[in-house]
Image (spheres, coloured by chain):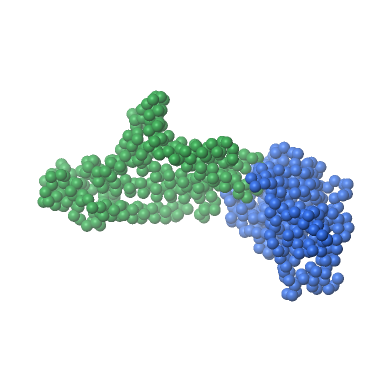
Chain colours: A green, B blue
Amino acid sequence: MIAYVIRRLIAGIVLIVVMSIVTFALFFASPIDPANFACGKNCSPAQKEVTAAALGYNDSFFEQWGKFAKGVVAGRDFPDDPKVRKTAPETIAHCEAPCLGYSRERTSTVTDLIKQTLPVSMSIAVVAFILWIIGGVLLGVIAALRRGTIIDRGLVGLSLVLYAFPTFFVGLLLYKFVAIDWGWVDVPRYTTIADGGVTGWLSSLLLPGVTLAVFFMAAYVRMTRAYVLESLSEDYVRTARAKGLPGRTVTFKHGLRAALTPIVTMAGLDFAGLMGGAIITESVFNYPGMGKLAVAANADFDLPTLVGLVLLLATFVIIANIIVDLLYAVIDPRVRLS
Amino acid sequence: MADFHSGTPSFLTVEELKVHFPTSDGVVKATDGLTFRLERGKTLGIVGESGSGKSVSSSAILGLHRWGNALVSGRILLDGTDLLTLTDEEMRRLRGKEVSMIFQDPLSAMHPYFTVGNQIAEAYLVHNDVSKKVARARAIEMLDRVGIPQPDRRVDDYPHQFSGGMRQRAMIAMGLINNPGLLIADEPTTALDVTVQAQILDLLQDLQREFDSAIIIITHDLGVVAEMADDVLVMYAGRAVEYGKCKEILTHPEMPYTWGLLSSVPDVAGDTESRLVPIPGNPPSLLNPPSGCPFHPRCTHRDKVPGDLCRTSRPELLPGSRGEGHLKACHLTNADEVFRKEVLVEINPELAEER
């Protein structure tokens, strides 16, 4: 088992390295010259050449990638140029390991940018995750158990409608009515635990969390319903009934257990994806999360930030994959490794 | 046993059992008036093609239809109690205790996520007020009884770690752990290797002697019937078409459908000249069964019946020429003769000559 985990971790690291090379390559393929950006509007060709040299844009692809990789492990300086170090040491920014790069547009290391934005995205993701898992699975099970009744049809129909609503629409509706018109909650503004305590933090996450959860919940209701129905029609459920087990034991012990496996998989991957930032939700509520950062970085052609965000998200997904696989083994003895 | 005109009450008496499934296309009459009885220690073989209503009828005895939208009528008397009048809770208490069932495919019939021992002990725990430890000990005892080697170790295995035969043994252990009076075995050997089949049948017979249980064995394999059954009930389109002592039915069948089943059995030791004669056509739709005798569209002997009788009137299940103990639902009056002269020569020429 431990050997398996180690194997998976090594494979994950290899995957991240490959991801970083691919992301790097994508930006190299872009027609925009980063030196132009760095140098500014009224840049003469000579100035541009100096800037490019100072910032290392003239180095080969693998040299640049090597510096980046070294920075992740050991940290690095920006710009890492001996001439600049002599002439203007005050312009050099040091980036501690793990250094994901330095954003010139935001005059900040990418690691710092992530440190500021990740808690916001993660908070929204956690709150949304809890809401949608509890709501989605619970309602899905209810729909499956009341199959064919008004309750089932109502839940399935409602989830279809909610699924069809775009996130920005749901978010704006909640914003306008719940927060502004009816005043049930404060106008949402991200509050850290340090500022507002746990209650303040949670209440600031309520609307964005619900907005995000509604979409996923709708999908999970339908998914759970389908898996539970499938599981309840299995032969082993009939065996459980034939043994004379009470209905509740049959449904919850024998029926639900098998339906859980695929739901756990989906939930793990969806959650990992969300940690990278919920772009629309964060934009609607103007929360300074990673999703918003990614959109802004994209608009500014802020390559270092984008590369850092992509890699971080990839890491999340890879880790979530490993965790899901391990959970699988816990749930299903058939995939347990001896 | 086949004589259900006798007055003495049987251990299991099924009378006019009907299981109908209303669908949007009409009513599917999966079982349409089934009557039989069975004593303790005896075995009834229910034979028929897929879709003839065998499994549905036996599931009805266990009350498994209660989860669907099936309409069940008639009477199922087990030891004097009509199972169809019981509440769901009363039926649940009987299920697995007085009546047990083992299923065709032991791999899908066992929960993949729980250990074999856990699943067997669960059947004991639900009907007996004992500790988990006692139930586990009982599960090990049963596993030992059904011939699982090292049962104290294998009890913690998962079903996928068992072989097919062992899984079916474990299912039998689960079915018999509460010493039920009636065991329903729904094609218990169909999913198994032939060598394992014989072992499982042997085991069932042993256990039957030990526990004095009644067994209903559902099968399409006449070899299984010949091996196991005291009585045989041949089902077609949801009804019994022939019913009597096992030996009687297998040697002197009087219904062309039973002939067809017999002709479809390959005989390993038999003459290579003997022919395998399949029954033409497919089992009828239970939604719109054929008029008259439901078997008439596939029956090669319907010309021997005068007039349009086979097409217009459904034959009742009545004693034929072989006496009270052998019931058949067929218009043929000289069935025994037709069988000897036309069917037996095809499928077993030697036997035909001997007579």
Q: Quadrant of residue A229?
A: top right
Count of numbered labels shown in the rendering: 0
- The front one of B92 and B166 is B92
Q: Residue at x 42, y 43 (%)?
A: A271
Residue A12 is at least partly visible in this image: yes
Please give the name of the residue rendered at 47% of the width and 49% of the height, measured from the top-left corner.
A326
- In terms of image quadrants, where is residue B162? bottom right
Could you say which is closer to the camera, residue B54 or residue A66? B54
- Can residue B56 be seen in this snapshot? no
Residue B292, image x, y percentages: 77, 54
Q: Residue at x 54, y 45 (%)?
A: A226
Looking at this view, is B49 or A207 the one in front? B49
Q: Position of residue B112 (x, y in %)?
A: 58, 51
Instruction: Classify residue A207 as left or right of residue B203.
Output: left
A197 left or right, relative to A93: right
Measuring from the top left, give residue A59's x and y in whole percent. Answer: 20, 55
- The x and y percentages for residue B1 are 84, 53
B301 vs B323, nearest the viewer:
B301
Residue at 62% x, 50% y: name it.
A235
Res A60 quadrant in image: bottom left
